[in-house]
Image: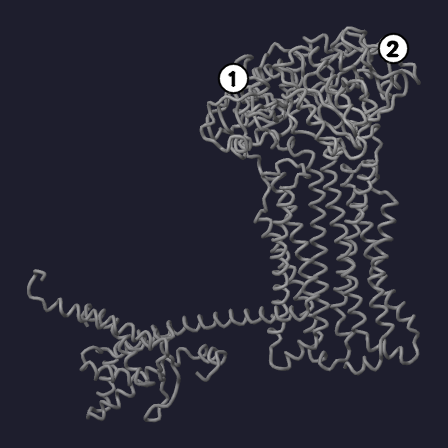
């Protein structure tokens, strides 16, 4: 076929009807001629020819329809082919400029990948409904008694029964607590994370087991509570997903326990580490021990506020019947005592909400910077390619075609970045959800959300089109022909340059906001890490040592066994000291209680603070290097038969005494009648949360108040690793029933308490540094273009005697105007934006002048350095080269 | 035209067109003349039905169309067999022969019993 497709298409379009008419007319004319040759008259021949042809109008319509369809198909194929060839051209031109393509792709990929990953996290953790039936009606239920410092007060067993039976706004109510249990499977004992819950637990959450049945109220009374429901993960890891597991009996804390059910994989309440659910064995007559957390399902149509009002009046009624509790004289009618009703979702995700939101905002800024950066690159490049485009135009490509090609290039680039970004998002989300360093709630439910990916991708492709189009149109307006002539470059690029300058200012401004936010968070984190905790965690190894309950039924046995273990451990080479205690700093496991000081009338303010109580063995203070300010440490002479003694810390002592006056005085705990004589004053410690002020501590001799689930603290000389084998061996030899699967360093333990902050800080600093890098690339690109466009002018100026220094100053000056504008806008933006950070900052003001000044100056320096290279090139302009290049 | 004959004609018309063009480029009128002659005027009663068939074959890219001059110097649309059309013709002709023979044999049978 000789006519080209384009010609044919045009031709066809114009004359589908005419062609069909011509064809039919030709046929009839030929027939007529033949019939006439056979002797028919002209008139009859004509009629006969028409007759033989049949329904000409119908034939005509049919043919036209077919031809039109055919034309459409051909047109479509040609369009596809030309788009394809545009893409091929785009990719070929990418190959010719690998640096440009790589920078643009990586930039977009970082923006898209980080944004998608972070939004997927937010989506999975904060936005998606909890995987329980009608999660909107689920609340966490606790109590508060602010007058005595109990902002968060657990529930007693009596409380649980009361709220369960008497709050009519609640459809169901359960209490639960997390406590470990030693599981003895085959041989090696192991510590499990166990949830003990009241009978309505599974009813409240509305989740059915995948195997067997849940436990209910019948199994929730003491002595009937010998059944267990397994979490899915534990069932998989310890029973290999055996479907016949229901009915088997396992040994928990020496107690034979029958497995009755297995929960689905999606059930991870209250935390993903729960392995076994046991019925608590609710005893409503137990008035003390507020260790339970409530979880409730509200009746349909009831609000949390209604529940709070109704349950609070119930709480007051109960409190009036507790004279011991209200000894401080708090009038239950005017008290701020209240129940605390939180939506279960907020309760679960509460602490991670703000950091996640901050990071989400940070990635949005980064995506904006990335897009602005690529736009700058694209527009610089299309400006530099003005001549190529003009040439194409001169050679016959229409303007539309040239614009389409530029657009195709932007879209191709955005797609490249998008594909790389999606891959990056998957890698990031996988890294975060599989990392042991990240402790976020609901992590198991996080996956890359296609909705999020689609959105980010659409944004970047739309941006690609917008920014590809702008310079293309600018170029067309400026006149392609003038490009060929090579003159008037400066004027031709006016609009494009203004756009580029705006983009660079925007990039710099946004990076300043990110950088200052990251700087504040970093400073806050350093304050936290550098905080004097009051003890020295380095080289301290922590071993949880729950003794087998069956064997250790009386306290004396516990004291003897632990003393023996500690003594043997101290003899191990490399072990400097060892001590036993109820609990160690940052274990999250703490006993607090109100206290009374002999000779001081208890006032409301005195009642407003509580003391942390820890029983410690001799040598605990020196093992943790907590200084003993006055008096003495506990020793082997402090036994259950001797005078009850205590060591208080300065946080407590300084409230009542100065210096060593505390020694010899007596304190007692509310709810107890024993007076403890103070024998020593220790330094204050921050052992609950780095960010909160030290709480008052009272230490008791472990021998006087032993516990069968103590922890060991062991200080080694240098790296503990060599001694650990021997430590393990010794403990296993002395007490084979102790699970040794949880040996960690104290540093590690503390580090976990800072995990969320650490991740926030690391990510934010990472984002900020990337943003600065991108902004640097952006300003470099724009200034390079500026110099390229004025290369000839600079050359001539040099030739007629201008100082190279003047040119450097000129270019630097141009760049610095942009930089100062951007940084100035950014500082203003940061002042507004960082107010939002206040909640996650510790000991740092949101307007910290040092952070603002350092980072603003730092970014200006980066900008100046980025401008310097193009400026130097300007100063070395060679007039001959510049002229010849035209 | 009887319905039975029309259906049969429609399916065979494509095949006949391809056959006609196997001798070389032809315009519509020449094709209709050839079919009339080759089938003893039996098959083509309304000549117009040829054209939608031709255009359909062109759309399926079995034949190509091009304007040219006829033997008596008129503007006429010539159709050419394309390689795809030639292959199609071979395949369809084989099937047609097999079916036609089988049907003819069956229709000539005088006994209901199978041998």
Label 1's element? helix
Task: Tell me if label 2 and label 1 are in contact, CB under 8 Å.
Answer: no
In this figure, which residue is indicated by the disc labeled 1?
A217
Q: Residue B40 occupies which quadrant of the picture?
A: bottom left
**Crowd class of label 1 (few under 14; some 14 to 19; many from 20; radius 10 Å):** some
Quarter of the rendering occupied by the N terminus of chain A: bottom left
Can residue A844 be seen here?
Answer: yes
Label 2's element? loop
Q: Are marks 2 and 1 on the same chain?
A: yes
Q: Which mark is residue A665?
A: 2
The image shows residue A478 at horizontal and vertical percentages of 71, 74
Mark 2 belongs to chain:
A
Q: Which mark is residue A114?
A: none
Q: Earlier in the sequence, mark 2 or mark 1?
A: 1
Image height check: is B34 above or below A550?
below
Mark 1 belongs to chain:
A
Image height check: is A315 above or below A799?
above
Q: Residue A392 occupies which quadrant of the picture?
A: bottom right
Residue closest to the eye, A232 or A42: A232
Q: Residue A222 occupies which quadrant of the picture?
A: top right
Residue closest to the eye, A417 or A816: A417
The image shows residue A279 at horizontal and vertical percentages of 55, 19
Residue closest to the eye, A863 or A543: A543
């Amino acid at each position: 076929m000789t006519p080209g497709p384009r010609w044919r298409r045009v031709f066809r379009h114009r004359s589908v009807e005419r062609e069909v008419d011509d064809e039919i007319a030709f046929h009839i004319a030929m027939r007529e001629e033949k019939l006439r040759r056979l002797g028919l008259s002209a008139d009859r021949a004509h009629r006969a020819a028409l007759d033989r042809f049949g329904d000409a109008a119908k034939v005509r319509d049919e043919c036209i329809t077919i031809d039109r369809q055919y034309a459409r198909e051909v047109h479509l194929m040609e369009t596809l082919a030309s788009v394809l060839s545009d893409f091929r051209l785009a990719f070929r031109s990418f190959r010719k400029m690998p640096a440009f393509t790589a920078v643009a792709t990586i930039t977009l990929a970082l923006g898209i990948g980080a944004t998608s990953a972070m939004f997927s996290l937010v989506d999975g953790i904060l936005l998606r409904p909890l995987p329980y039936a009608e999660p909107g009606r689920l609340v966490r239920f606790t109590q508060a008694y602010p007058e005595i410092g109990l902002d968060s007060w657990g529930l007693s067993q009596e409380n649980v029964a009361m709220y369960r039976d008497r709050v009519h706004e609640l459809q169901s109510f359960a209490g639960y607590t997390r406590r470990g249990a030693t599981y003895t499977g085959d041989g090696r004992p192991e510590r499990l994370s166990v949830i003990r819950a009241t009978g309505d637990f599974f009813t409240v959450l509305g989740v059915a087991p995948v195997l067997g049945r849940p436990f209910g109220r019948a199994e929730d009374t003491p002595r009937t509570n010998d059944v267990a429901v397994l979490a899915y993960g534990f069932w998989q890891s310890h029973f290999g997903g055996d479907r016949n597991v229901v009915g088997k009996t396992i040994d928990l804390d020496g107690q034979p326990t029958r497995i009755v059910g297995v929960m689905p994989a999606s059930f991870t309440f209250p935390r993903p580490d729960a392995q076994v659910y046991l019925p608590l064995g609710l005893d409503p007559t137990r008035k003390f021990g507020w260790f339970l957390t409530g979880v409730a399902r509200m009746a349909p149509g009831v609000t949390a506020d209604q529940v709070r009002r109704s349950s609070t009046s119930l709480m007051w009624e109960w409190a009036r019947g507790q004279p011991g509790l209200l000894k401080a004289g708090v009038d239950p009618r005017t008290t701020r005592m209240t129940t605390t009703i939180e939506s279960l979702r907020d309760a679960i995700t509460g602490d991670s909400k703000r950091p996640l939101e901050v990071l989400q905002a940070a990635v949005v800024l980064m995506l904006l910077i990335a897009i602005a950066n690529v736009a700058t690159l694209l527009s610089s490049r299309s400006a530099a390619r003005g001549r190529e485009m003009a040439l194409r135009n001169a050679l016959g490509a229409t303007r539309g075609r040239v614009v389409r090609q530029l657009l195709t290039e932007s879209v191709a680039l955005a797609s490249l970045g998008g594909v790389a970004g999606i891959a990056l998002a998957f890698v990031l989300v996988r890294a975060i959800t599989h990392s042991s360093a990240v402790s976020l709630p609901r992590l198991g439910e996080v996956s890359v959300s296609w909705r999020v990916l689609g959105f980010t991708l659409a944004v970047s492709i739309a941006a690609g089109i917008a920014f590809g189009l702008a310079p293309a149109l600018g170029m067309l307006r400026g006149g392609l022909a003038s490009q060929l002539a090579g003159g008037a470059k400066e004027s031709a690029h006016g609009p494009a340059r203004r756009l580029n300058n705006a983009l660079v200012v925007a990039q710099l401004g946004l990076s300043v906001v990110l950088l200052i936010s990251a700087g504040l968070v970093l400073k806050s984190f350093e304050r936290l890490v550098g905080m004097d905790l009051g003890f020295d965690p380095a080289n301290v190894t922590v071993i949880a040592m729950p003794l087998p309950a069956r064997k250790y039924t009386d306290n004396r046995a516990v004291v003897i066994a632990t003393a023996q273990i500690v003594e043997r451990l101290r003899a191990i080479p490399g072990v400097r000291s060892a001590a036993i205690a109820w609990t160690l700093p940052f274990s999250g496991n703490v006993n607090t209680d109100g206290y009374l000081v002999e000779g001081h009338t208890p006032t409301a303010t005195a009642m407003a603070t509580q003391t942390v109580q820890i029983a410690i063995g001799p040598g605990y203070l020196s093992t943790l290097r907590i200084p003993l300010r006055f008096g003495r440490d506990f020793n082997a002479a402090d036994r259950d038969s001797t005078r009850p003694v205590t060591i208080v810390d300065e946080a407590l002592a300084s409230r009542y005494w100065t210096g060593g006056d505390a020694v010899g005085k007596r304190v007692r705990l509310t709810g107890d009648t024993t007076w403890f004589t103070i024998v020593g004053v220790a330094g204050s410690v921050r052992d609950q949360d780095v960010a909160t002020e030290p709480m008052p501590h009272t230490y008791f001799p472990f021998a006087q108040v032993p516990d069968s689930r103590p922890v060991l603290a062991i200080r080694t000389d240098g790296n503990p690793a060599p001694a650990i084998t021997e430590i393990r061996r010794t403990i296993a030899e002395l007490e084979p029933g102790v699970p040794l699967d949880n040996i960690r360093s104290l540093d590690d333990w503390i580090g976990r308490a800072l995990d969320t902050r650490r991740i926030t800080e690391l990510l934010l600093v990472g984002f900020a540094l990337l943003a600065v890098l991108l902004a640097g690339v952006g300003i470099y690109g724009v200034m390079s273009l500026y110099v390229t466009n004025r290369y000839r002018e600079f050359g001539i100026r040099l030739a007629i005697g201008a100082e190279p220094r003047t040119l450097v100053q000129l270019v630097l000056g141009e760049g610095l105007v942009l930089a100062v504008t951007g940084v100035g806008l950014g500082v203003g933006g940061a002042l507004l934006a960082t107010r939002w950070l206040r909640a996650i900052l510790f000991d740092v003001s949101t307007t910290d002048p040092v952070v603002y000044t350092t980072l603003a100056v730092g970014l200006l320096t980066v900008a100046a350095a980025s401008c310097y290279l193009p400026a130097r090139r300007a100063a070395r302009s060679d007039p001959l080269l510049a002229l010849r290049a035209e | 035209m009887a319905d039975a004959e029309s259906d049969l004609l429609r399916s065979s018309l494509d095949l006949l067109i391809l056959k006609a063009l196997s001798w070389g480029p032809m315009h519509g009128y020449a094709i209709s003349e050839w079919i009339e002659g080759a089938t003893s005027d039996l098959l083509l009663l309304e000549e117009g039905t040829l054209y939608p068939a031709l255009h359909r074959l062109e759309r399926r890219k079995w034949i190509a169309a091009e304007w040219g001059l006829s033997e008596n110097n008129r503007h006429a649309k010539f159709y050419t067999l394309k390689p795809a059309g030639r292959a199609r013709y071979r395949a369809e002709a084989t099937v047609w022969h097999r079916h036609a023979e089988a049907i003819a044999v069956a229709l000539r049978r005088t006994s209901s019993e199978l041998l």
